[in-house]
Amino acid sequence: MWVLLLINIKSEREIELMKRAGHLNYLTHEEVKKHLCPGITTEKIDKIAYDYITKNGGVPSCLGYDGFPKSICISINDEVVHGIPKNRKLKDGDIVSIDFTVRLNGYESDAARTYIIGNATKEIKDLVKNTEAALYEGIKEVKPGARIGDISNAIETYAHAHGLSVVEELVGHGIGTDMHESPDIPNFGKKGTGLVLKEGMVLAIEPMLNLGSKEVCMLDDDWTIVTQDESPSAHFEHTVAVTKDGYRILTGE
Ligand code: MF3
Ligand code: CO
Ligand code: CO
């Protein structure tokens, strides 16, 4: 059987436009970060992001995506991804993942960060720190000629070396004019396998790592993904372009 994967290769001009979308995504994360504190509701954080994105000419493209009701995903503690902002207040010790896409000039950008509110145990601090480090381990693999499996394996190896489990049901993805394009980028896999990367591909790499078991399930709201054992989970994501000699992070500064 043949499986045809159409991968959209972006021109330099398109990557410049995606960098602008990614920069607005970055600035929005910076704006949101300023307001995170115990007592703020996740709905209020969502409004801050919506206002900032729209004021700067962008589109909060999660809003209405497959019926998602808000502009950003906020996932707390055992929530892995796709938490829906509501009247829940952040409290000391929460770990809060903020994930959203910003569309600008027709191009999408996707980035996620996880924050600790106030104080947390060393275990939790390490979960967050090591999930971010796992993202960079994956990103470091990106260059023409490398394979998707090299990214996946680097993330998995780092996670397991630090005692964390890898969520398997949700994956990174290509990104461009659509939020989700081919190929999938699992956070586990074998080196030297999968699609060969080419200059002009743009990838959203996004490890979701758990302190306990890797198993997840969906809440009744049909969006929020939680860990089955209720252990905490962290999530970091960047949108990254494959360049002539490596990579460029489009959702960085
Ligand atoms: N930002 C998510 C991702 O990393 C997608 C969010 S789903 C939405 O792929 F419905 F909220 F848009
Ligand atoms: Co995302
Ligand atoms: Co994504």
Image (cartoon, rainbow, N blue to C red):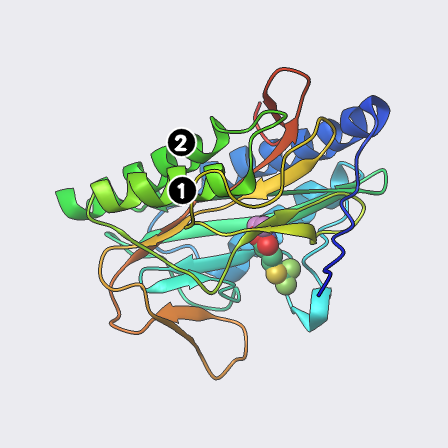
Q: Nearer the viewer, residue 202 or 21?
A: 202
**Quadrant of the rendered structure where residue 102 is?**
top right
Q: Quadrant of the C terminus?
A: top right
The structure residue drawn at horizontal position 67% and vertical position 58%, both measured from the top left corner, is 62
Q: Is residue 207 visible?
A: yes
Residue located beneath label 1 in the image: 153
Q: Which mark is residue 100?
A: none
Which is closer to the viewer, label 1 or label 2? 1
Q: Identify the amino acid type marked 2.
A: Glu
Q: How many numbered marks have been drawn onto this rendered protein structure?
A: 2
Category of crowding for the residue at label 2, using alpha-carbon neighbours closer than 10 angstroms: few (below 14), some (14–19), many (at least 20): many
Of the residues under marks 1 and 2, which one precedes in the sequence? Answer: 2
Marks 1 & 2, CB-CB < 8 Å contact: no
The structure residue drawn at horizontal position 81% and vertical position 22%, both measured from the top left corner, is 12
- Identify the secondary structure beneath mark 2: helix
In the rendered structure, the answer to whether residue 193 lies left or right of residue 76 reads: right
Q: Position of residue 44 (x, y in %)?
A: 53, 56
Q: Position of residue 61 (x, y in %)?
A: 72, 54
Mark 1 to mark 2 CA distance (whole Å): 9 Å
- Identify the secondary structure beneath mark 1: helix
Q: Position of residue 98 (x, y in %)?
A: 48, 50
Q: Is residue 121 visible?
A: no
Category of crowding for the residue at label 1, using alpha-carbon neighbours closer than 10 angstroms: few (below 14), some (14–19), many (at least 20): many
- What is the residue that sits farthest to the left in this orientation? 122
The structure residue drawn at horizontal position 69% and vertical position 30%, both measured from the top left corner, is 198
- What is the residue that sits farthest to the front in this orientation? 1
**Residue 82 vertical placement versus 154 (above, below):** below
Q: Position of residue 37 (x, y in %)?
A: 36, 46
Residue located beneath label 2 in the image: 137
- What is the residue that sits farthest to the top in this orientation? 245
The structure residue drawn at horizontal position 56% and vertical position 30%, both measured from the top left corner, is 146
